[in-house]
Image: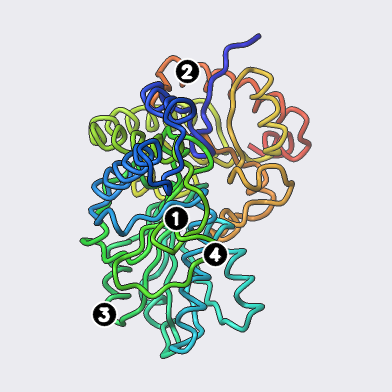
Amino acid sequence: MKKLIYMDNAATTPVKSEVLEEMLPYFSEMYGNPSSIYSLGSHSKVAVEEAREKIGKAIGANPKEIFFTAGGSEADNWALKGIAYRNRDKGNHIITTKIEHHGVLHTCEYLEKQGFEVTYLDVDEYGIIDLNQLKKSITDETILISIMFANNEIGTIQPIKEIGEIAKEKNIYFHTDAVQAIGHINIDVEELNIDLLSMAAHKFYGPKGIGALYIRRGVKIDPLISGGAQERNRRAGTENVPGIVGMGKAIELAYENLDENNRKLIKLRDSLIKKIFDNIDHVKLNGHPTKRLPGNVNLSFEFIEGESLLLSLDMEGIAASSGSACTSGTLDPSHVLLAIGLPHEIAHGSLRLSLGDFNTEDEVDFVVEKLVEIVARLRAMSPLYERVKEEK
């Protein structure tokens, strides 16, 4: 069996050993329900609150403003639906972008069917919104602006501070899907004027199935799930104690040496990009060249199909993606790549390599070597590429 080279960390990350070690007791001897009043349950309650404190500290929030969910998509749904329904008497207009994760886009589409109006902002060739268009889109009916912190496909980071200032000035709630950013970028919700923020543990070396929504104190929002008094009556359901404990440990580890880790990751990312461009022609980097996530590399290779590229890499033991993990099983071109202006035929040849803490320079060299071979083989079967070669 070939050694696995994992370069799909934007889809999910492995659980770090320190995180797993902290979680294990809560599957066995520390199995109490946090809602129970006896000591076994109290131990679980304490563990949940300690994790809440770690998460709050990581983003500059009060622990009481952190509410646990089953993941990022639930947090997105809660933020949009909860704000929309609770504040419908004030307005029915929501502003978002064309490149959001489907957790936001599909929720907006659902709300449109419920009578809400949604404005989908354009982005430029790098995936960044126009702040002037945002300002012009605001009406007396606008109750929420929801714009992702960093894009899951192309890695572009939005001007979150400026967006937060606009929202605050207009007295509009500001939600950001920070699933890709948390654990990888320093975030202070107070400094950035963020009212609601979604996160998911499995994007920063924590377990799957656990996430959180930051809700600023004073924000008026309806619950998404009813049926119990957990999470201070805002999110019913017995708490996923092992997952919560793991999430707390994972975010603590992520921010302990964030700057140093990011320097290493950016160096590795830039090395990968340079070596690919040095060895392969007709390739385009998607997303902003510098305002991007430290580990994100999204490329379009002309004259080939992304699916064939992915399958060929997999045969070499390399795990990558053509875009969002939630849509990589489809043959449709990425809505993100189309939104930044790529034609369908170029968007179809996209590849996302997302690096993480465990990748090495040797792995980068191996991936580049195999990419050169695979791209050459696939292009040899392309009549269009052969025609372009003849015209040179």
* Viewer-closest of 10 and 23: 23
Nearer the observer, disc 3 or disc 1?
3
Residue type beneath disc 2: Glu
Q: Residue at x 21, y 61 (%)?
A: 191
* Viewer-closest of 180 and 32: 32
What residue did someone put label 1 on? 126
Nearer the observer, disc 1 or disc 2?
2
Question: Which quadrant holds residue 113?
Answer: bottom right
**How would you rate the neighbour count of disc 1 (Cα within 10 Å): few for under 14, some for 14-19, many for 20 or more?**
many
What residue did someone put label 4 on? 226
N-terminal-most mark, 3 or 4: 3
Residue type beneath disc 4: Ser
* Viewer-closest of 213 and 308: 213
- Judged left or right of residue 213, residue 348 is right
| Cα–Cα span, label 1 and label 4 | 41 Å
| Cα–Cα span, label 1 and label 2 | 27 Å
- Judged left or right of residue 194, residue 280 is right
CB under 8 Å between discs 3 and 2: no
Nearer the observer, disc 1 or disc 4?
4
